[in-house]
Image (tube, grey):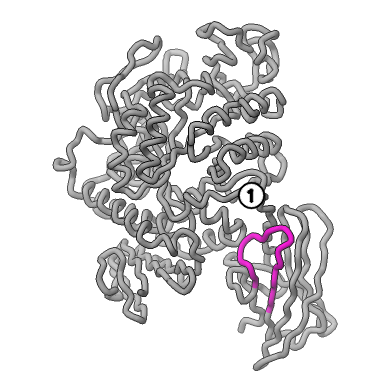
Amino acid sequence: MKTVFYNPLQTEYKSPRGAVAVGEELRLMIKFTRPANPDVVEVVVTKDGEKEVPYTMIQKDAQDGVFEYQTSIKITSPGLYHYYFNVHGDETTYYVGSDNNLDALLGKGNKWQLTVFEPIYAEPEWLKGGVMYQIMPDRFCDGGDRLTTKRGVIYRDDWGGTPEYRPTSEGKILNNDFFGGNIKGIIKKLGYLKTLGVTCIYLNPIFEAHSNHKYDTGNYLAIDSDFGSEDDLKTLIKRADKRGMRVVLDGVFSHTGDDSIYFNKYNKYDSEGAYQSQSSPYSDWYDFKKFPDKYKSWWGIDTLPQIDKTNKRYIEFVCGVEGVLAKWGKLGIGGWRLDVADELPDAFLDAATRRIKSITPDALVLGEVWEDGSNKIAYGYRRRYLGGKQLDSVSNYPFKEDILNFAATGDGVRLANTVGHIVNNYPKRVLDSLMNILGTHDTARVLTVLSTADRDISTRDGRAAALASDLDKAMAKVRLAAALQYMLPGVPCLYYGDEAGLEGYEDPFNRRCYPWETPESKWDKRNKKLLSWYKLLGKIRAANSDILAKGEYKHVESGDGVFVFERESYGDKITVIANATDKPLDYAIAGGPIDLITKKPYTNIVPAYGVAIVRKH
C-alpha cells in the first residue's frame, strides 16, 4: 500500500507547476499514511553544486489517518535547483524521492528538479496556439527569376529528382546542386500555407553561401542570389504579415563557410580573409593551429571553420547596434532560430537575445537544443538557456522521439514520463512556445521512420520507399503522431512536405522537393488524406486556441498502446485519446462531448492507430 503522496504536476502538491520565477511564492504539500505522525518533515533544496538548505514543513490536521505537511518558500536567484523530503520519526529519518513519473517514493528515488528563472523579456505571445512551418528554400517552390551564373554549381531541371549525394574523388560531398526554389516561390505559396493554419514560417538559412543548405555562411549581410534579394525578403515579410504569419530566420553563428568573405580560402572575394593573411580584420575570429591550413573547424569538417564566439569584435559584429541581428530585425522578422545553441557561449546568447528583443520586444528567440533545455550540460558546463536572459523556446526533440516511439511501439508510459518531466522542468512561458517537431532537415522523414521501408541503404539510392502493404498503416501512424504533435503543450512545427507524404532518410534524402508538379488530382488517395489531416489539425488549433495556446496539461492515463491527456483553460477542456494498437479502443467520456475530428458526438470508440480529440461545450 502506498504510504507517501506527492507529485509536482498536481497543484494540490506543488503550486505553481513547472518552473518558478525569482521571488515567486512556491507552495509545497506532502501527505503520509506512514510513518504515523512524523516528528518533523523537511523539504531540502539545493542549487546546482551548492549547499543544501532545509525548510521545515508545517503539519496540518490529520484526516482519516492521512497526515499533511505544507510550506511556502521563495527563491531569490535564478538557476537549476533540486529538492527532496526528509521525514524524521520513530527515531529514524526517511528520505523521500521521485520515481520515473515524478510520484513520491519512501526511502529511495531521485531528487525533483526545480527550475528558477528571471522573467526579463516579453514573451512571443503571437506564436502560442499557432502552427510553424519549416522551409528549405531551394526545395519548396520555384518562383521563377532563376539565376544560373555561379561557378561550381549544378542547376537542376528535374524538380523532384534525387538530390546529389555521391562524394567527389577527394571524398567530399559538395551539396552544390540546386533545384530552383526561392523566396518568390514561398510568396507564391502563402495561400497554401494559410490552408494549413500556418502562423509562423521558419526558413532554413537564406544568407549568401556556397551550398544548397546555406549552413556554411558566406556573407551574413546579404541574401543569397539563388534565393532572391533583400527586397524579396521584405515582400515576403509584408505579405505574410497580411495573412497573419511571421517569418523567422535561421542564424548560423558558430561557424562560417571556408568559401566566405570572412575566411576566403578560395580567393573569391575582393576583401582579405582570415585564410589569406594574419593581418585580416577577421583573423582573430578563427583558431589557427598552424597558419593557414590547420585550423579549428566545426565537428572536424574543414569547409566549416569554427568561430571564436567569445571574441568581442565578433559579438559586436553579430549583436551590436549595427550588427547582423539588427540589420535583419529592422526588416520586421518575427525572430530567430539559433543553430547549434550548445556551441554559443552564454555571453554571446545574452548579447544576441538583448539585441533581438531591443528591436522587437516580442520577437522569438529559439535555440536548437536536442535534449532537455532546462538542465543541459554542454562542453563541460551547465547551460542557462531558460533562465530568462536567453531563449524563449527550444526545439522539442524529447517530445519528437517519444511521440514517434509511441506511434511505432505503443509505449504510452514512456511518452507520459517524458511529457511530465518537460512540463515540470520548463517555465510555462517556454512550454507554451516549444517548437514541437516530428521531422527536420537533420532527421529522416516521419513517414519513413514509421514505415517498414527498405532499411538497406548500402546502395545510397535514398528512396526509402515504404512497402505498399505497409503504407496505409504507416500513414495512420503519421496521422496519430501529428495529432499528438498538435495537441500537446507547445507549437507544432511542420517540416515542409511531411504533409504531402514525402519520404527519405537523413541528408540529403530528407531534403527532396515538395511535389508541386504532381497535380493533387493525380496524388495517391493516401497522400490526399494525409494533407487533409494536417489541414484539419490546423483548423482545430485555430478554433480552440483559447485552450491550446496556454491550457494546462494533465496526464489522465497511459499504458500499452494508450495515451490519454487533457488540456484545460478556465474550466474549458479538451481530452485527447490516442490509440497506438491495431484494434479499436473503447474509451468512455461522460457528458456528451463533441469529437473535433468528426464534428459529431463522441462515440466512445477510437479507431486502430487513431485518435479522438473531444471537447465539452
**Residue at the image position 67 percent from the left and 63 percent from the top:** 112
Foreground of the two, 10 or 508 = 10
Q: Position of residue 508 (x, y in %)?
A: 39, 30
Q: Is residue 15 magenta?
A: yes
Residue 405 against residue 254 in the figure, above or below: below
Q: Amino acid at mark 1?
A: Leu
**Residue at the image position 63 percent from the left and 49 percent from the top:** 386
- Magenta-colored span: 14-30
- The quadrant of the picture occupied by the N terminus is bottom right
**Side of 260 relative to 64 (left or right):** left
Q: Residue at the left extreme?
A: 521
**Residue at the image position 67 percent from the left and 88 percent from the top:** 66
**Side of 7 relative to 605 (left or right):** right
Q: Position of residue 271 (x, y in %)?
A: 58, 8
Q: Residues within 10 Å of mark 1 (few under 14, many from 20)?
A: many
Foreground of the two, 81 or 238 = 238
Q: Position of residue 427 (x, y in %)?
A: 61, 57
- The quadrant of the picture occupied by the C terminus is bottom left
What is the quadrant of residue 253 in the picture?
A: top right
Q: Is residue 438 visible?
A: no
What is the quadrant of residue 23 in the picture?
A: bottom right
**Side of 399 relative to 195 (left or right):** right
**Side of 558 relative to 71 (left or right):** left
* Residue wearing tag 1: 386
Residue 119 against residue 2 in the figure, above or below: above
Residue 379 against residue 39 in the figure, above or below: above
